[in-house]
C-alpha cells in the first residue's frame, strides 16, 4: 500500500465553509453537470465539480490556491441546473470568502468584517476616530495659520488635514494588506499549479484589465446576465470616484480653486464626482434588485455579499445627500447645518469601512480576482 | 362471503395489474381489470426485449393472455378509468367510465377497415414515429385482438367508409361512453408509469434536435414490429447510426425533474448497446453516467456488455447537446469526473435514458393514499394495495413477484374480515 493517498480533511474548514454560505455543499454527488453548463469553465480541468469535491473533503490548501475559484463569476447557471440543490455557485462564493480570510494579513479583522455580529465593533473604529477629530477641530482651526486653512465645505466640522491624514493612513494600510494578500496567494498558486506562470506579465495584466473593463467574461453568464451591467456600472462609478478624489487632492494641495487650471479642475471634479455618485447608487441598487430577484435560481448570497453591497449603497447615498444638504445653506456655504454634518459623518464612516477594510471584505475580490486572472493568463489557463 | 365481497378490482392492466388479476383469479377470486388504454400489457408491450432473459415481451404476454382467456373469474375493461370510489374496506363501490371503442366484439381483425380509412394519425404505440389510420389495431399482439377508432381524428358517420368495408358489422360509430358500477372487496393499484417528458430537460435538446431520442423510442426502433421494422435508424434521415451516445439520468435523480432513480435505465442502456452491436458490431457506443446501478444478478450483464469492444463508459453527466444542422450529427458534452477533462463527443444519434414518471403523480388517485415526493404510492390503505411501478420504479421480473404478493395481500384483506 505504498501508493496510498491519505486525504486529510480539514473539518473545521468544512464547517466554516458551510457557515459562509456553502451549507449545501454536501448535497453534491459529482455528476459534473455544473462544469458543463458553466459558461466560464475551460475544457481542461473544468470547474466547479472538482472544487465541490475538494470542499466536501475539506481540502483547504487546494482550494485557496486554486485560480479557478476566481475565474468563476457567479453566473448561477451551475446552481440553476444542479440536480441536487448543491448550489455550486454559492459554494464557490463561500470558498472565495474563505480565501480572502485566509490571505488577510490581519486575520481577526477579516473575521470581524465578515461577521454580522461584530458589525458594531467594526464600525466603532471609524466612529471613534472621526468623533475625536471632530472634537479637536475647533481648537486646531483656531491655532492653524490662515495660509494652511482649506476652504473645504465641512472643514469647520472636521479639519481637512485630519480627514486626509486619516484616510491616507487607511489607504496605506489597505495597500499593505492587499499587497501581502496577493503576494501570498501568488506564491501558493505557483506552488500548487501544474503549469508555471511563464507567460508575459505585462501582456497578461493588460489582457485581464481589458477583460475586466469590458466585462467580457461576466457577460457570458446566462442566469445572472443582467448582473454584469449592474456590476459594470458600479465598477465605473468607483473608477470615476477615484479620479475625482485625486483631482480634489491636486486642487487642495497644489492648484487651489483659483486660476484657469484650478477652475477647470474644480468643475471636472464636481462633474465626474456627481455623475459617478449617481451611477454608483444606480449600479448598487440594480445589484440589489438582481440578487433579490434571482435568489431562487442562483442563490441569495450571504452577509459577506449583502454587507458589502449595503455599504457601497450607503457611501453613494450619504455622499450625494451630504452635498445636497450642505448646499441648501448656500452653494458655497461653509457652515452646514446639523443634519448635513450628521450625514457627512456617516459618509466618512462608510468610506472608511470601504477603504480601510477593502482587502478584508468582499471588496478584496478586486485585488484577488485580478491577480488570479493574471496568474491564470500567464499559466495559459 | 358474497361474490361481490370476493371481487378484487385491479386498476391498470400492465404486467403488474395482469399478474395480480390472474394470480388472484386462479386462487378462486373474481378479478376486474380496469385499463386506460386500448390493450393489456402496458409499457412492457412496447419493449423490444425484456429482462431477465432478453426475450421479446410477446413471449411472456402470450402466456398471460392464455391464462386470462379461459378464466371466467377475470373481467377486463379497456379504455376504462376509475371515476369514483365509495364505500369502505371489504365493500367498495367503484364507478368505472368506459370510453367507446367504436368496434365491437364481432371484429375478426381482418383489417379491411384500415384499407378504407382515409385519415392518418400519429401512432402513440410507436411514440409518434409512425402513423396509423383513424381505425387501427393498437399492435400486432393486442389483447383484446380488436381494432379501435380514434374519434379525435375520425370523420364519423359523415365518412363511414370503414362501416361499409366491414363484413362483420363490427363497427358502430354511434357507440356511447358507459359507466359500469363494480362492487369489490379490495382494490389493487397497478397504475404504472409514463416515460418522463424529455422536452422538459431544456439543455438536452429533445424536440429541438431530431436525432435526440428517448430510451423508450429506442425500444420501438429496435423492435421488429416497430416503425422501422427493427432497424435502428436516425429520425432525421433514416441513416443507421455509426455511433450513439447514451445519456443516463436524463431528468432522473434531478430535483428539477424526477428526484428519484428509476433503477432500470442503466440496464436498459446496456440492453440498447447490445441491440446496437447485434445490428452493427462496429458501431461506437458511448455511455455517459453518474453512477452505474444494476440490481442484483444483473451485475454480470453490465460486466459483459461493458467489456465488449466499441463500448466506452464515461463517468460524467451530459449537460449540453449541440447539433450540426448540415449533417444532423450531435455533439454531447460532459466532464469526465475521473480524468477531470471535458469530453465533446460527436455522434450520429443520442439516446436519453429518461426515467419512470409514476402515473399516480399527475393523475389524482380515486382513493386517498400516501404518496412520496415523486408521486409513488408510499403505503397501502384499508383493503387497498399498491403494486409494481405505481409503488416504486423496478424491472419486470420484480414487478411480477411484487404483483403476486399484492394478489395475496388483497385476498388476505378480504378473508380476514
Image (cartoon, coloured by chain):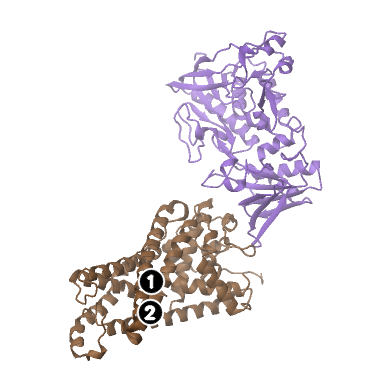
Chain colours: A brown, B purple
Q: For this view, does B39 lie left or right of residue B224?
A: left
Quadrant of the rendered image containing residue B406? top right
Q: Which residue is mark 2?
A: A247
Q: Residues within 10 Å of mark 2 (few under 14, many from 20)?
A: many
Quadrant location of the N terminus of chain A?
A: bottom right
Residue at figure coordinates x 30%, y 68% from the top left = A320
Q: Residues within 10 Å of mark 1 (few under 14, many from 20)?
A: some
- Which of the pair B415/B398 is nearer the observer? B398
Residue A136 lies, in percent from the top left, at 20, 84
- Which of the pair B36/B212 is nearer the observer? B212
Q: Is residue A220 visible?
A: yes
- For this orientation, the residue located farthest to the front is A260
Secondary structure beneath disc 1?
helix
Quadrant of the rendered image containing residue A98? bottom left
Residue A239 lies, in percent from the top left, at 43, 72
Q: Which residue is mark 1?
A: A272
Mark number, residue B106:
none
Lower sequence index among marks 2 and 1: 2
Q: For this view, does B147 lie left or right of residue A373?
A: right
> How many tags in the picture?
2
Q: Are marks 2 and 1 in contact (CB under 8 Å)?
A: yes
Q: Which of the chains bears the disc numbered 1?
A: A
Amino acid at each position: 500500500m505504498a501508493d496510498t493517498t491519505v486525504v486529510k480533511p480539514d473539518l473545521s474548514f468544512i464547517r466554516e465553509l458551510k457557515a459562509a454560505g456553502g451549507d449545501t455543499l454536501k448535497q453534491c454527488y459529482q455528476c459534473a453537470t455544473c462544469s458543463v453548463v458553466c459558461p466560464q469553465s475551460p475544457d481542461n480541468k473544468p470547474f466547479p465539480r472538482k472544487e465541490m469535491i475538494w470542499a466536501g473533503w475539506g481540502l483547504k490548501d487546494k482550494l485557496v490556491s486554486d485560480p479557478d475559484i476566481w475565474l468563476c463569476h457567479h453566473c448561477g447557471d451551475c446552481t440553476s441546473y444542479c440536480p441536487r440543490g448543491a448550489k455550486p455557485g454559492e459554494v464557490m462564493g463561500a470558498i472565495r470568502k474563505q480565501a480572502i480570510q485566509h490571505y488577510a494579513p490581519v486575520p481577526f479583522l477579516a473575521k470581524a468584517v465578515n461577521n454580522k455580529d461584530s458589525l458594531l465593533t467594526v464600525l466603532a473604529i471609524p466612529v471613534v476616530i472621526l468623533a475625536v477629530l471632530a472634537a479637536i477641530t475647533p481648537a486646531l482651526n483656531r491655532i492653524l495659520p490662515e495660509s494652511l486653512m482649506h476652504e473645504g465645505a465641512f472643514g469647520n466640522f472636521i479639519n481637512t488635514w485630519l480627514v486626509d491624514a486619516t484616510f491616507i493612513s487607511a489607504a496605506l494600510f489597505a495597500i499593505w494588506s492587499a499587497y501581502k494578500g496577493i503576494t501570498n496567494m501568488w506564491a501558493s498558486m505557483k506552488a500548487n499549479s501544474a503549469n508555471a506562470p511563464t507567460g508575459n506579465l505585462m501582456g497578461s495584466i493588460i489582457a485581464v484589465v481589458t477583460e475586466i473593463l469590458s466585462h467580457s467574461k461576466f457577460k457570458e453568464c446566462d442566469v445572472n446576465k443582467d448582473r454584469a451591467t449592474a456590476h459594470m456600472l458600479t465598477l465605473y462609478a468607483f473608477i470615476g470616484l477615484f479620479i475625482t478624489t485625486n483631482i480634489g487632492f491636486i486642487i487642495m494641495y497644489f492648484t487651489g480653486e483659483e486660476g484657469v487650471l484650478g477652475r477647470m479642475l474644480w468643475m471636472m471634479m464636481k462633474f465626474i464626482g456627481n455623475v459617478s455618485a449617481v451611477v454608483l447608487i444606480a449600479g448598487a441598487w440594480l445589484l440589489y434588485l438582481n440578487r433579490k430577484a434571482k435568489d431562487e435560481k442562483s442563490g441569495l448570497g450571504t452577509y459577506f455579499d449583502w454587507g458589502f453591497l449595503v455599504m457601497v449603497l450607503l457611501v453613494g447615498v450619504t455622499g450625494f445627500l451630504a452635498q445636497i444638504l450642505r448646499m441648501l445653506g448656500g452653494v458655497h456655504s461653509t457652515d452646514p447645518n446639523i443634519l448635513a454634518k450628521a450625514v457627512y459623518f456617516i459618509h466618512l464612516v462608510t468610506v472608511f469601512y470601504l477603504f480601510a477594510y477593502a482587502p478584508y471584505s468582499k471588496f478584496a475580490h478586486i485585488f484577488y480576482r485580478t491577480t488570479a486572472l493574471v496568474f491564470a493568463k500567464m499559466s495559459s489557463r | 362471503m358474497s361474490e361481490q365481497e370476493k371481487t378484487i378490482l385491479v386498476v391498470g392492466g400492465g404486467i403488474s395489474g395482469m399478474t395480480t388479476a390472474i394470480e388472484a383469479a386462479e386462487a378462486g377470486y373474481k378479478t376486474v381489470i380496469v385499463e386506460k388504454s386500448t390493450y393489456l400489457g402496458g409499457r412492457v408491450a412496447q419493449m423490444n426485449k425484456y429482462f431477465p432473459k432478453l426475450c421479446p415481451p410477446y413471449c411472456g404476454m402470450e402466456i398471460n393472455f392464455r391464462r386470462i382467456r379461459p378464466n371466467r373469474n377475470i373481467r377486463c375493461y379497456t379504455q376504462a378509468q376509475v371515476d369514483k370510489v365509495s364505500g369502505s374496506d371489504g365493500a367498495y363501490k367503484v364507478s368505472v367510465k368506459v370510453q367507446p371503442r367504436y368496434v365491437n366484439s364481432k371484429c375478426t381483425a381482418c383489417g379491411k377497415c384500415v384499407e378504407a380509412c382515409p385519415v392518418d394519425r400519429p401512432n402513440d404505440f410507436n411514440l409518434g414515429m409512425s402513423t396509423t389510420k383513424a381505425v387501427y389495431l393498437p399492435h400486432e399482439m393486442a389483447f383484446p385482438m380488436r381494432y379501435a377508432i380514434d374519434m379525435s381524428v375520425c370523420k364519423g358517420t359523415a365518412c363511414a367508409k370503414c362501416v361499409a368495408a366491414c363484413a362483420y358489422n363490427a363497427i358502430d360509430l354511434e357507440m356511447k361512453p358507459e359507466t359500469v358500477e363494480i362492487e369489490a372487496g379490495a382494490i389493487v393499484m397497478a397504475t404504472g408509469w409514463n416515460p418522463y417528458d424529455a422536452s422538459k430537460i431544456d439543455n438536452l435538446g429533445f424536440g429541438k434536435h431530431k436525432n435526440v431520442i428517448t430510451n423508450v423510442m429506442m425500444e420501438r426502433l429496435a423492435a421488429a414490429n416497430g416503425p422501422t421494422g427493427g432497424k435502428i435508424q436516425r429520425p432525421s434521415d433514416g441513416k443507421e447510426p455509426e455511433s450513439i451516445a447514451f445519456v443516463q439520468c436524463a431528468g432522473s435523480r434531478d430535483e428539477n425533474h424526477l428526484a428519484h432513480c428509476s433503477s432500470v435505465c442503466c440496464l436498459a442502456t446496456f440492453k440498447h448497446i447490445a441491440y446496437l452491436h447485434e445490428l452493427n458490431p462496429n458501431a461506437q457506443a458511448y455511455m455517459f453516467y453518474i453512477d452505474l446501478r444494476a440490481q442484483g444478478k444483473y451485475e454480470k450483464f453490465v460486466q459483459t456488455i461493458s467489456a465488449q469492444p466499441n463500448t466506452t463508459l464515461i463517468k460524467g453527466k451530459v449537460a449540453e447537446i449541440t447539433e450540426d444542422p448540415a449533417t444532423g450529427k450531435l455533439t454531447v458534452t460532459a466532464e469526465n469526473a475521473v480524468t477531470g477533462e471535458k469530453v465533446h463527443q460527436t455522434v450520429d444519434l443520442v439516446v436519453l435514458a429518461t426515467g419512470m414518471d409514476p402515473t399516480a403523480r399527475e393523475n389524482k388517485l380515486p382513493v386517498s393514499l400516501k404518496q412520496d415526493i415523486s408521486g409513488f404510492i408510499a403505503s397501502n390503505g384499508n383493503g387497498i394495495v399498491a403494486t409494481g411501478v405505481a409503488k416504486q420504479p423496478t424491472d419486470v421480473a420484480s414487478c411480477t413477484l411484487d404483483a403476486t404478493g399484492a394478489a395475496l395481500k388483497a385476498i388476505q384483506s378480504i378473508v380476514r374480515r
